[in-house]
Image: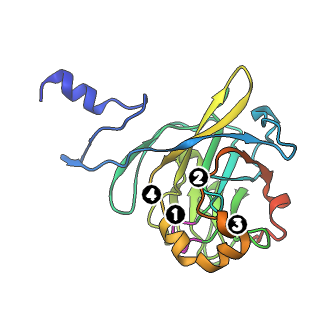
C-alpha cells in the first residue's frame, strides 16, 4: 500500500468508511446503511422545522421501520465526531450532530441490552436532562439517555456511547441531513450496531398488536415527530 492509498483508506467524514487501524491491527468496520430518505414532519404533516425543537427535550419518530422508534434530540451543544465500536468489535466513525450548532442527533430508542423501547403506554428509556437519579446505579454523567430496565447509560453527545450498565454497544445511530435553507431534517440511514432483527423476533406478537401488519415495513416518505410525553402515556423516571 503506497502513501496515497493509505491516506485514502484512513480518511473519514465524506461517506464510506474504510478499514480502521486499531492497536496495530486492521479491524473490520461497520458501514452506514441506506434505509431510504424520510422527511421528518410535525403532527400536521408539515415539514418539521429544526429550529422548533426545544433543547434537551425527548422527541420520538419511527425509522427505518414502522415499529422501530428513534430519539431525536437537540442537545443544546455541539456533538463532535467520535470513533465507536459495536459489540462484535466492528469500528465506525459517528459523524456528530447536524444543524447550525451541530447539536441535532438521532438514535434508535431500542436499548442495546434487553431491547427495551418506548411504547404508547410505557417507556423505560429516555433522555434525562442533568444526572439520572438511581441509588443502585449512580449517574456516569449529565444529559444521558438512561434505561430504567437495566440502568444502561448512553451519552448522546458522543454517539450514544455506553457510559454505564450492562449494554455492550452504543445505540444504533440514525443519520440526519439538515437543509439549512428550508430548516428541515431528513433521516437517511443507520450506522453502528443494528438490533432490528432481534427486536422483531423478541416482540413479534406485541408489535403485531401495536402496529399491525405494517410493523416490518420500511417507513416511506415521511415520519411524524412527537414529544415523548405526547407519544407515551407513562414515561418512567428512575
Mark 1 or mark 2: name the one nearer the start of the chain.
Answer: 2
Q: Which residue is mark 4?
A: 193
Dot 1 and dot 2 residues touching (CB under 8 Å):
yes
Q: Residue furthest front?
A: 213
Q: Is residue 16 left or right of residue 59?
A: left
| Residue at figure coordinates x 43%, y 28% from the top left | 14
Residue count near mark 3 (Cα–Cα under 10 Å), binned few <14, some 14–19, many ≥20 = many
Q: Alpha carbon of mark 4 to alpha carbon of mark 1: how far?
A: 9 Å
Q: Alpha carbon of mark 1 to alpha carbon of mark 2: how far?
A: 9 Å
Mark 4 or mark 3: name the one nearer the start of the chain.
Answer: 3
Q: Quadrant of residue 149?
A: bottom right
In this rendering, the label closer to the viewer, 2 or 4: 2
Residue 188 % position (x, y): 56, 40
Q: Is residue 112 rendered magenta in the image?
A: yes
Magenta range:
111-115
Q: Alpha carbon of mark 4 to alpha carbon of mark 3: how far?
A: 19 Å
Q: Which residue is mark 1?
A: 196
Residue 203 % position (x, y): 59, 76
Q: Is residue 220 rendered magenta in the image?
A: no
Mark 1 or mark 3: name the one nearer the start of the chain.
Answer: 3
Give the dominant element type of the magenta stretch: helix, strand or loop.
Answer: loop
Q: Alpha carbon of mark 1 to alpha carbon of mark 3: how far?
A: 14 Å
Mark 2 or mark 3: name the one nearer the start of the chain.
Answer: 2
Amino acid at each position: 500500500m503506497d502513501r496515497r492509498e493509505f491516506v485514502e483508506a484512513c480518511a473519514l467524514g465524506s461517506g464510506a468508511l474504510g478499514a480502521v487501524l486499531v492497536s496495530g491491527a486492521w479491524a473490520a468496520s461497520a458501514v452506514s446503511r441506506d434505509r431510504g430518505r424520510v422527511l421528518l414532519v410535525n403532527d400536521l404533516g408539515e415539514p418539521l422545522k429544526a429550529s422548533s425543537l426545544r433543547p434537551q427535550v425527548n422527541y420520538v419518530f419511527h425509522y427505518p421501520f414502522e415499529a422501530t422508534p428513534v430519539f431525536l434530540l437537540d442537545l443544546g451543544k455541539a456533538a463532535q465526531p467520535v470513533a465507536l465500536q459495536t459489540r462484535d468489535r466492528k469500528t465506525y466513525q459517528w459523524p456528530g450532530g447536524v444543524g447550525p450548532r451541530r447539536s441535532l442527533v438521532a438514535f434508535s430508542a431500542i436499548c442495546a441490552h434487553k431491547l427495551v423501547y418506548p411504547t404508547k403506554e410505557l417507556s423505560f428509556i429516555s433522555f434525562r436532562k442533568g444526572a439520572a437519579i438511581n441509588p443502585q446505579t449512580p449517574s456516569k454523567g449529565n444529559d444521558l439517555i438512561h434505561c430504567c430496565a437495566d440502568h444502561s447509560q448512553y451519552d448522546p453527545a458522543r454517539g450514544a456511547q455506553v457510559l454505564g450498565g450492562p449494554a455492550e454497544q452504543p445505540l444504533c445511530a440514525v443519520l440526519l441531513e439538515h437543509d439549512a435553507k428550508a430548516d428541515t431534517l431528513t433521516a437517511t440511514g443507520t450506522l453502528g450496531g443494528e438490533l432490528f432483527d432481534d427486536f422483531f423476533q423478541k416482540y413479534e406478537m406485541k408489535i403485531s398488536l401495536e402496529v399491525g401488519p405494517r410493523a416490518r415495513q420500511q417507513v416511506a416518505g415521511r415520519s411524524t415527530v412527537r414529544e415523548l410525553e405526547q407519544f407515551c402515556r407513562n414515561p418512567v423516571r428512575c
